[in-house]
Amino acid sequence: LENAPSEGQDYAEEEDRIKWVTGTMFGAGADTSAVSILVFILAMTLNQQVLAKAQAEIDQVIGQDRLPEMSDRESLPYVECVLREVLRWQPVTPIAIPHVSVEDDEYRGYFIPKGAVVIGNVWAIGHNESVYQDPEQFNPDRFLDPQIPKPPSFGFGRR
């Protein structure tokens, strides 16, 4: 807006739109992080044995002289399982962001025309009993099995 040609045009409305979009994007990012942290705290409060096991892994790998770093992630497999289980158990976005079909498609006998809006049910995917045994139970150990898929926490499809 600062570099826009000044021909007596009023850019106040455009500036307001930019502010609203920016605020919405910030709010969406902050909200998903806050929800994830709250669900993590709830899960750890309800599952003290999981908390103790994760804490023991952190103490063994990192110790108490420094904070964890992203490079430690591979050395913390149980903590990784806990994070996956938090996102599966109570997904941040239970209903995924809408996608648009770019071509005609068929899924399990259902015709999906090009241009159709498709909305995935992330909660149902993460609570599918044929994939996740006892899906209502908070159980990070399920992800120790490499055959168990990661939860579609923030949706799926191309970005």
Image (cartoon, helix red, strand yellow):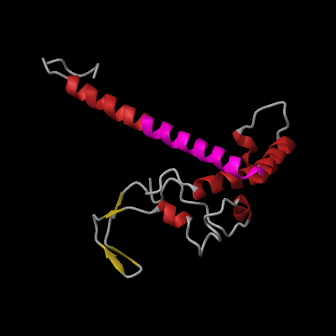
Left or right: 147 with respect to 123?
Answer: right
Of residue 23 and residue 39, the one placed in the foreground of this image is 39
Q: Give the range drawn in magenta.
A: 27-48
* Residue lying farthest to the front in this orientation: 46
Dominant secondary structure, magenta = helix
Is 117 on the left-hand or right-hand side of 13? right
Residue 44, horizontal then vertical, whole percent: 70, 48
The one nearer the camera, 91 or 4, is 91
Magenta includes 62?
no
Above or below 153: residue 62: above
Give the residue drawn at x 69%, y 53%. Answer: 82
Horizontal and vertical percent position of residue 35: 54, 43
| Residue 7 rendering spot, x and y as whole percentages | 13, 18
Residue at the image position 34 percent from the left and 35 percent from the top: 21
Q: Residue at x 28, y 20 (%)?
A: 3
For the view shown, which residue lies furthest in the left direction?
8
